[in-house]
Image (cartoon, helix red, strand yellow):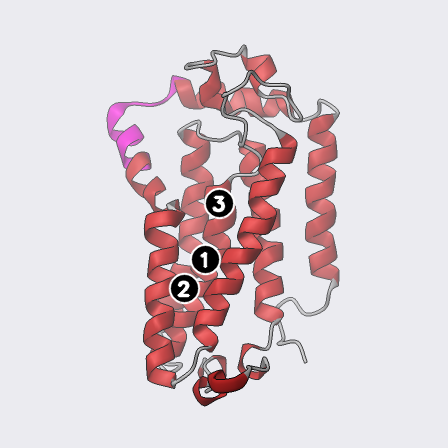
Amino acid sequence: MPRPVRPAGWWCDALLLAGLVTLTVALAGGRLLGLDLAVSRWAYAHDPAPLYWTARVFNLLGQGGWLLMPVAGGLAAAVAWRRHSVRPLLLVATTFVLTTATIGPLKLWTDRAAPSATVKAPFLPPEEAVEIFNRLPEGAYSMSYPSGHVANAIVWYGVIALLLTALAAGRLPTAVYRLVRFAPPAILLVTTTYLNFHWLTDGLAALLLGLLLDRLLRRVPWDDVPLPGRLRAWSGPFTSVT
């Protein structure tokens, strides 16, 4: 039986998916591109060095390869050892597969340049770079939509918060849980847009997709997933202590 999520029901999942589809269709039809261009131009015009480098440092919170996945993997290993269970490792593996199978292909399909493509190779005109479903020159960065930093942050920091709670045997302070869960995605939505790593709508699409993936993962009854053979000896629960 699926675990409860808040808000309850599948209506929220359907709303998130509908929002992502609507946003994508609107961009494909040329809508909201002016908003993206205006925000990008404002960011380029307001980037004093102290603010720029502060944003660069905070943007490191979204690095998946050397931060999010290693931290989640390390926490999963610690919880697995303490709970005598492979289930935390199953959570991390499933999260990796789910994010890889959704965020990456969507980026490839939509073929959108980053705002930075207007100031460095391939030096596209802004009105061309902002287009979605673009026909970009070979070798040009064309994986801007949606923002992988933001979508991955929502999913992976949700996993990290869950594992931290399990490691603390359910005694993780609520303020700490909320800080880990919500602060990094919000910071990354702002910094990736301000640094012109992504258009504003890249981040909004990532927000919708990330929340949808997060809800799907949280519905899985990890403590009850059947395990084969010898893995049953390491089948202790871990989410029931959160």
For the residues labelled 3 and 1, the Cα–Cα distance comes to 10 Å
Along the horizontal axis of the image, is 229 left or right of 109? left
Front position in the image: 62 or 19: 62
Residue at the spot of label 3: 150
In whole angstroms, how far apart are the C-alphas of marks 1 and 2?
6 Å
Distance from Cα at disc 3 to Cα at disc 2: 15 Å
State the quadrant of the N terminus. Answer: bottom right
Q: Residue type at mark 3?
A: Val
Q: Nearer the viewer, residue 1 or 55?
A: 1
Helix or strand or loop: what does disc 3 sit on? helix
Point out residue 242 in the picture as x, y percentages from the top left corner.
45, 79
Identified at 40% across, 17% down, the residue is: 45
Q: Magenta segment, which residues?
A: 45-55
Label of residue 232 in the image: none
Q: Which residue is mark 2?
A: 160
Q: Position of residue 170 (x, y in %)?
A: 40, 81
Tell me the chief SS of the magenta region.
helix
The amino acid sitting under disc 1 is Trp
- Relative placement, left or right, of 218 versus 87 is right
Q: Residue furthest left?
A: 50
Where residue 180 sits, quadrant-wise, is bottom left
Label 2 near label 1: C-beta < 8 Å? Answer: yes
Classify mark 3: residues with Cα within 10 Å, few (<14), some (14-19) or many (20+): many
Looking at the picture, does residue 13 appear above or below residue 36? Answer: below
Residue drawn 47% across the image and 19% down it: 117
First in sequence: mark 3 vs mark 1: 3
Report the residue marked by disc 1: 156
Percent from the top left, x then y, of residue 24? 69, 35
